[in-house]
Image (spheres, helix red, strand yellow):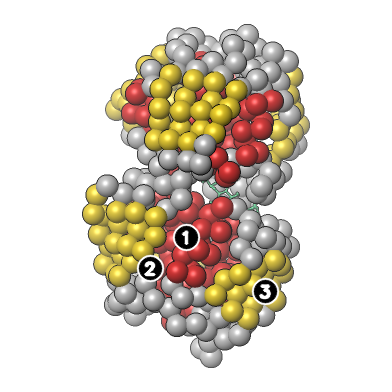
Amino acid sequence: MDKIVIEGGRRLEGEIRIAGAKNAALPALAATLLCPGRFAFSNVPDLKDVDTMTELLKVMGADVKKEGGGVVTVDTENLTADCEAPYDLVRTMRASCLVLGPLLARLGRSRLSLPGGCAIGERPINLHLKGFQTLGAEISLEEGYVNASAPDGLSGRKVYFDLVTVTGTENLMMAAVGAKGTTILENAAKEPEVVFLAEMLNKMGADVRWAGTDRMVIVGGKELRPAEISIIPDRVETGTFMAAAAITGGHLRLAGCNPSHVEAVTLKFAEMGCKVAEGRDWLEITGPKRPQPADVETNPYPSFPTDMQAQAMAVLALADGASVVTESIFENRYMHVAEMWRMGANITLKGKNAFVHGVEKLSGAQVMATDLRASASLVVAGLAASGKTRVRRVYHLDRGYEHIEEKLRKVGAKIFRQRDKNPK
Ligand code: EPZ
């Protein structure tokens, strides 16, 4: 296992190119199961989670080629008979559940190991399964696997999500394109990654309407064909580097991003005293001498994203005053707080609220990454902390950030990766 070592206290200055979005690439790769043929993707990020999804497609018989330079081709002409998503792959990445919808649509059946919980919460997929049942699928659970089958095919219906679920919306979109008739998704997620998936499905010949609103309409049964598409930029990577500029009082230009996907984040960093300029596909952010306090509440898009909560908290930990952070999406997404305490942060947890009393400085320490975005927040905190911060178990980081230490080193951070001799 590796660890990342950061010598903090350096102001970042320069340009970073933003990679393709992990959470857009994963559903797009799963959508290749919907019909036979050769798909071509560009701007695919080089991430562990993307490798896990391509591994899963290969296990199902797809021919996947990483052509280099962010190009990945997937040929799903010949899928294996069983098309099962095995426990060993699913337990490392919950988004494997995204194969359920397309396999149900194409084959009328799918079998997936239940993903199990993860550090940020139990993260059930009950709403996915309830949606499939509404479209006529039979669902059974045995030995930790979920079996979904629709021997007579799926039928378009109205699906109502009890709460907003991103991958639940994406799974039902993919199932609905294979259903006879029209499906309505009520209380659908509106994330840019959902809109991107709709764009890909429509390029494949599907008829998905009103993506980006909370009431999506899918006219099923269309003839589908493979597509070529470029993955949209990663808004969470964008926000994470914005936090790096904010916490170091630096100046970063983020190239190849989509500022319209990070409006809530930009406004929040402006509230903390950052100056932000933006163009069609770039954003420049200058951090303040010391951040101002700001209250943050996470909610579904277009509100402030839960995937940016930990990174924002790292900045607020050094603010000139007190802030309240409220995590409304996941029940256990404060794993980074105990690690920040080790760096001298003054944060009090009360249920879904975190009271962040800004301190003058953070000090470097040995800290442990627990989930993807928590580890990113510890890197952000380490950039500003005095002395050395060692972030261990950085495999969490590698799941969702493309060569983060190289990108940060390029703009002046003193950061490098080291083999962790004592990974316990
Ligand atoms: C997606 O996860 C993202 N992952 C997450 O990003 C992101 O944090 C999350 O959406 C919220 O924005 C991908 O897109 C691959 P949800 P997802 O279903 O779809 C509950 C990252 O760091 N729920 O929108 O799994 C659930 O427990 C990752 O990149 C049910 O109760 O999240 C949670 O409390 C982390 N039953 C809430 O809904 C269900 O059937 C929102 O979850 C489904 C969800």
Question: Ligand 1 within 8 A of label 1's CB?
Answer: yes
SS of the residue under disc 3: strand
Where, quadrant-wise, is the C terminus in this rendering?
top left
Q: Is residue 80 left or right of residue 113?
A: left
Residue that badge 1 annotates: 27
Where, quadrant-wise, is the N terminus in this rendering?
top left
> For the residues carrying marks 2 and 1, which lies nearer the camera in this image?
2
> Of 246 and 277, which appears nearest the observer?
277
Cβ atoms at labels 1 and 3 below 8 Å apart: no
> For the residues carrying marks 1 and 3, which lies nearer the camera in this image?
3
Residue that badge 2 annotates: 227
Q: Name the residue rendered at 69%, 13% in the picture.
A: 320
Q: Earlier in the sequence, mark 2 or mark 3?
A: 3
Mark 1: few/some/many CA within 10 Å (<14, 14-19, 20+):
many
Q: Position of residue 170 (x, y in %)?
A: 55, 63
Residue 299 showing in the rendered view: yes
Q: Position of residue 278 (x, y in %)?
A: 54, 33
Q: Is residue 383 left or right of residue 354?
A: left
